[in-house]
Image (spheres, grey):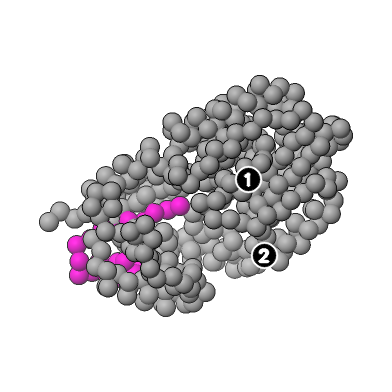
Amino acid sequence: MKRGFDVKICSLCSEFQGVIDKVEIESYSILHHSARQKTEIFLKVCNDYQPDSIICSEPIAIIAAHKFKKDKKISVIYDVTEWYPAMSMLQDHGFPLKIVHGIKFFLIQLYAGLLSTHFIFGEETKKFPLAYFFPFKKKMILPYYPDESFVSEGIKKLESNQITLCYTGALSEDKGIGNFFTAIEILRKRRPELNIKILIIGSARTETDKIYFDDQLKKLSVKAIEIRKPTSFEDFTKAFSDADICFDLREFNFENHHSLPIKLFYYMGAGKPIIYSSLKGIRKHMDVSDFGFLVDPKDSGSIADCIEKYIVDSRFYDLHATNARKEFIQKYNWKIISDSFINFIENSLPKS
């Protein structure tokens, strides 16, 4: 739209047909339908809209776009934002089947790469395997920087006798809710006089996650806990505006290590110091030392040390809060990278 493009979005996770901010949206709630039905819907949308370029976020969409492309000169761009196959796609299978399905999904990923004309990678660590199997296809790195209009500044001053610690996202073991609680317990024992408040924004994805979270909650001695439901990205920063420090202590595993969590940039934009697992995806992309800490999520003592550094030196906290907001404004918002994205799309269009 910025350069005269007409834009249409098609999603299969909810039911909606209409126009928002001049963008046409055709969305269907068929996430649990068969791959064939999903492909047919995508193909129908393409045939009706007749796009010159199609950006796809998953293999099924790529396959549908390729079928449409057979008689057209268009670009099919694979936007790789999630690790594929995700661990959640394999978690319901036992050992032998897990390997079989892992290989199957890996081959589907390669097939989608073969059918694509271009690649967009959300971070450097997600370039494998497609960038290595198809090195001559044009590609770009496009991180998940939010638009400033969706990020509300919420810089706070630390109070001398209380602190609000915030966790957002899936309430599961692998995403680190247990690590978060364990670090808080250590802080509680070290500083019994400190009024610790816990803010949680999220929900359990599965019944197993819910059981795990409830069990962790029962063990927690801190009782000042507020749990809020997940919110839209437009209101996300407002939901944790009263937090002092924001956390993400997800486990070290292959999938997590290859992630650059989008939440990080919302935390920064809001002016919140962060304490994050030291993920390869973060370390390869940026230096967070001016506004937070990267830690071993299992080293609860060191995590408590980081929190205490803010408690004992409010000026250090103020510096990190200010730096977080400044770094977001200067380096890590959508405005900074939007032109490179638009140029990439323009250059992907077949020459007439």
Q: Is residue 258 above or below residue 218?
A: above
Is residue 206 in the magenta section?
A: no
Q: Residues within 10 Å of mark 1 (few under 14, many from 20)?
A: many
The residues bearing labels 2 and 1 have C-alpha atoms spaced at a distance of: 24 Å
Query: Which image quadrant: the C terminus?
Result: bottom left
Residue 251 falls left or right of residue 126: right
Residue 52 falls left or right of residue 97: left
Residue 338 falls left or right of residue 164: left
Q: Residue at x 72, y 34 (%)?
A: 303
Q: Which residues are magenta?
A: 60-81
Can you tell which mark lies on residue 240? Answer: 1
Q: Residue at x 37, y 75 (%)?
A: 41
Residue type of the residue flagged with mark 2: Thr
Q: Residue at x 60, y 33 (%)?
A: 155
Residue 192 location (% of width, % of height): 87, 34
- 333 or 278, which lies in front? 333
Badge 2 marks a residue whose secondary structure is loop
Q: Residue at x 59, y 61 (%)?
A: 88
Residue type of the residue flagged with mark 1: Phe
Residue 248 falls left or right of residue 124: right
The residue identified by callout 2 is 206
